[in-house]
Amino acid sequence: MKTIIAHDYLASPGGSEKVLEQLAKVFSKAEIFCLFKDNTIAFNRKLKAKTSVLQKIILDKKNYPAFAFLFPLAVSATKLNANLIISSHHSFIKNFRKPKSALHICYCHTPFRYAWHLKEGFLKRKPLPLRILLGAFLAALRYWDKRFGSVDYFVANSKEVKKRILEFYGRDSTVICPPVDTKFFTPGKKTAGDFYLVVSRLVPFKRIDLAIEAFKELGKPLVVVGEGRASAELQRAAGACGNIRFVGGVDNSQLREYYRNCKALVFPQAEDFGITAVEAQACGRPVIAFAGGGALETVVEGKTGHFFKEQTADALAGAVREFESMAFKQTDLRENAEQFSAKRFRKEIKSFVESKIKERNLGSV
């Protein structure tokens, strides 16, 4: 059986790419297709993926948002010829064309954020003329996104995303949480250090600006791990504060050491799921999280972390102060993290796909 795994694009690695990596392990004979890939990033180079015409059009892959208006056109022009197609979708890729007999299972990280649940905040940040143009584009994109899909079955990465799929697409879905490498991310031998940690793509919706503002007020050490188009803006916001340090992208071994040695992971965003929150817990460290989105499914108040209910810098700063008088057990943190293991993900996604293949009498994968 010919199988294709379709992913939106390979730019800066994040949670969706960790899912793609595990899908490629489960379906080891599958081809991988994406709209484009940034080959300056080692993670992307090791994944052998076919690309669309956008690979040649987007010369500077780090400036890919400027070409977003071309993505629906590129997807609509793409026909993937296979018996089984599994899409790893967070923006556009699920709407490719396929043979009528092909089975398309969409692992949905989220319906496209800026077209759906984050559209108002996204448009508010733009000047009025651009806001009008983008508003029209996003309205057309929502129509295309909802009407022209080829998905037979949706898999949601969290209960939060399951609700979005039902609200925006009118479709039911099965929840299979993303994989976390709990064999690699383990507690260290040392006690926690004195710094707090952010691990994230540095893009606006991650709300790292709240962490910067809160820790400027607190004066406590904060280490920011990650890269992204908002990096320069966030560093300007931090200014000359000696307590806030940006270390850019790091490899997994370095990341594990940051997790192991931090006091807590700071998680200010309303995430779809939030793999980093589970990685930190796997390393024995608690999470200070905004009480929204996927964190409500991965963090247990008072047992593996502490929530703040308003998405403001003041509320985050208050939560940090409260956190410092709380105690957490490493055994509780590990136990909670292990239910999201990569092994569990591979087993669940393989079982789901095989059940749908059997229903269609398509043979074996």
Image (tube, rainbow, N blue to C red):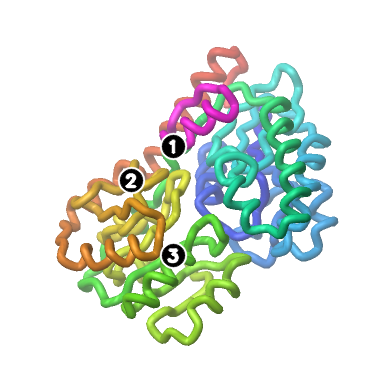
Q: Amino acid at mark 2?
A: Thr
Mark 1, Cα crowd under 10 Å, few <14 / some 14-19 / many 20+, is many
Closer to the camera in the image, 296 or 364: 296
Residue 235 location in percent, x, y? 53, 77
Residue 175 location in percent, x, y? 43, 31
What kind of element bears circle 3?
helix
Residue 108 location in percent, x, y? 55, 36
**Where, by quadrant of the figure, is residue 213 drawn?**
bottom left
Spatial CA span between label 3 and label 2: 21 Å
- Kindly identify which numbered label has been placed on residue 210: 3
Whether 163 is among the magenta residues is yes
Q: Is residue 278 visible?
A: no
Would residue 129 be found to the left or right of residue 340 on screen? right
Closer to the camera in the image, 311 or 251: 311
Q: Amino acid at mark 1?
A: Glu
Q: How many marks?
A: 3
